[in-house]
Amino acid sequence: MLRQHLEPRLYQQTIFNTATTKNTLVVLPTGMGKTMIAELLAAHRLQSYPGSKVVMLAPTRPLVQQHHDTFLRDLELTEEETAIFTGTVQPAKRQRLWHEARVIFSTPQGLENDILGSKIKLTEVSLLIFDEAHRATGNYSYAFIAERYRKQARNERILALTASPGSDKETIAEVCKNLFIEEVESRTGSSPDVQPYIQETEIEHVLVAMPEEFKVVHGALRRCYEQRLDALRTLGIGKGALVNKTMLLKLQGALHAEAARGHKSFSSLKAMSLLAEALKVEHAVELIETQGVAALSKYVERLQAAALQRQSKAVQNLVRDVNFKAALILLEKLKEREVEHPKLRALQKVVLRALYAEKEAKIIIFNQFRDQAVRIKEAMDAISVTSRIFVGQLKKGETGMSQKEQHTILEEFRNGGFNCLIATSVAEEGLDIPKVDLVIFYEPIPSAIRTVQRRGRTGRLERGRIVVLVTEGTRDIVHRWVAHHKEKRMYRVIDEVRREMKMGDFAAKAPSINQFDEKASEERGVERKEGCISIIADHREKASTVLKELTGHDEVRLELRQLDAGDYLLSDRVVVEYKTVKDFVDSIVDGRLLQQLRGLRSYPRPIIVIEGEEDLYGVRNVHPNAILGMLAAVTVSYNIPVLFTRSGRETAALLILIAKREQERGKPDFQQHGQKPVTDAELQEYIVSGLPNVGSGLAKELLHHLKTVQGVVNASEEELRKVPKVGEKKAKAIHGIVRKEYDPGK
């Protein structure tokens, strides 16, 4: 399937050979052809398993589109054999495309939603590719999709691709376990089989001194910052420890967790406020050190606006602080005198030097802050260098960009429409921009992953160059060396994980959430009753851990709908309103709960489930009597029981038990006729499922065998009995009701 003009490199062929037999994590620096390995393996799996599918996941829409275009260019595939799944494609269309396409390119969120809604099954997928696999940690969708794939696939194979999986063993181990990795293939620029193919990359660090005027502002902000730290130490927090941003965030998280459990005191509340103030000042210090006047001015303007609107007590305290006020006065003087950070002048010199050497040179300037990206654009305009800003889709001021705008700018840059791309982190991952002559870091970043990704934007086809701008005596120096040591540690840890895998000491296979997974059940000869319990969930619950837990149970047939009331429908009479502890209290305060209670009363057996281990009376500053009064009203006035669970897993187990008991009453399948579906197929199922003893599953069977709604209605009892799961009793009931004369009194 690989087009004849393409010839894989030796190391790509070696890695491909490993990936054909084992679930493999491939760690290759950006620009060394990870996608080619994916293409080789995709072609191999499609040929080995005719009729199967390949799915490639990538975290952003531009990257999904890029992979789609690359596969079409390099493999003998037609447009009709491929499909793109993103949030812009309607679920009904994705469901149709899933059945038609051989190779699907998707964002993880889009595919996760289809799995949760039972729109697709991964049974026929012979290869699942995770691009930017380092994201497979925590609650990111990659882990859930991999777990469902392993349970459903007939011919499992996983390929994970990344330039940098993480800098510590715990993170790399988590990625490997979440993606069921059995082998790690890693290469660096110094690997013997890679060296013949790589281009030399020159790295230069340009040091600049902080202006004396900046040091005065910096000093006032530092005094403000130290006062907050001293106050925290007086409260017994952060004593004797090296205090930095990471530690402040950890302390803040710990205090919020304690408060959520109801452990509140004056000192803890005061500490939370001080930590919030310290973090804001710390950010201001970072901006004056590494960015300059424009970025800091924009930031303090937002703080002052928030203080006027009384959005935060911490912000109000901060803008009243004497040292903070002094810093603002000094900052205004710098703006009036148009004093800029020396990085801007250094940047202009570096860019002009590059364009003098090569008039058509392509340059990427990476910068962490959107406000400063605007100022960098102005600096490029001042020296007549054509440039564009490339940022993410989240709107901030006027710098947010749509996906279409991103695509247009990248195409223009590739085609030489302008020289300089000013990018935030959105351009760090995966985007294919060939022949970048120079990459400039406006500031060093203390992340091995992001440093490797930024650096990989150049030196792909020809000799590349990297310039890092560093302010002397600031965190820039620290971040430069932190990233350096993290990267070295990353490759040591990768080698260690690989050795442990070979020795069998590394448990890459994460446990299934069921007692027996599908494959184990088949090996033991256990008969699996797939989908024997029907649960309808409101589609707005997609982000809930409960929904993911429910999809992990083979006996559950889950359907997503928009419910008129409640979050989970467990039978024709039982509806469940699901709330976390915090959401329950919030709904009392904002009045939502009373409205929801009235909606729940439309069902004979409504239930409220409250999940969480936090103290119900401590999550917000609400008088306990208000909460007790509402609990009394729910149970007595509305006659709705309230049940408590500790976790998403426990909630899912409770819902399954209730649904099972309800559906064993004699009506094992049911259909909620609330919100009408929009597609023709769903509307047909909706109509047929209203017949006696017919639920969503049986409706599909009837339509599959009898072709149309008319065919179902006109069928004889004998024809109905030929449909699987329709016995004599059901056939008689269906046949009788469609021929019975309408009588509104019966």
Image (cartoon, grey):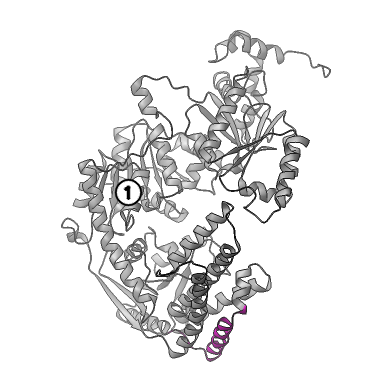
Q: Which residues are magenta?
A: 320-341
Residue 563: which quarter of the image? top right
Which residue occupies 35% across, 73% down? 478
Q: Horizontal and vertical percent for residue 746?
A: 81, 16
Q: Residue at x 68, y 27 (%)?
A: 573
Q: Is residue 318 visible?
A: yes
Question: In screen coordinates, is 187 left or right of 537?
Answer: left
Q: Is residue 327 magenta?
A: yes
Secondary structure under tag 1 reads helix
Q: Residue reaching furthest left?
A: 192
Q: In which quadrant will I find the N terminus?
A: top left
Name the one closer to the observer, 457 or 7: 457
Label 1, residues with CA under 10 Å away: few <14, some 14-19, many ≥20:
many
Image coords of residue 535 (percent x, y): 58, 30
Closer-to-camera residue (445/258): 258
Q: Residue at x 43, y 88 (%)?
A: 211
Corner quadrant of residue 658: top right
- In the image, residue 623 above or below residue 367: above
What percent of the width, then of the height, locates residue 196? Answer: 17, 60
Task: Classify residue 595 as left or right of residue 378.
Answer: right
- Residue on which the image places disc 1: 173
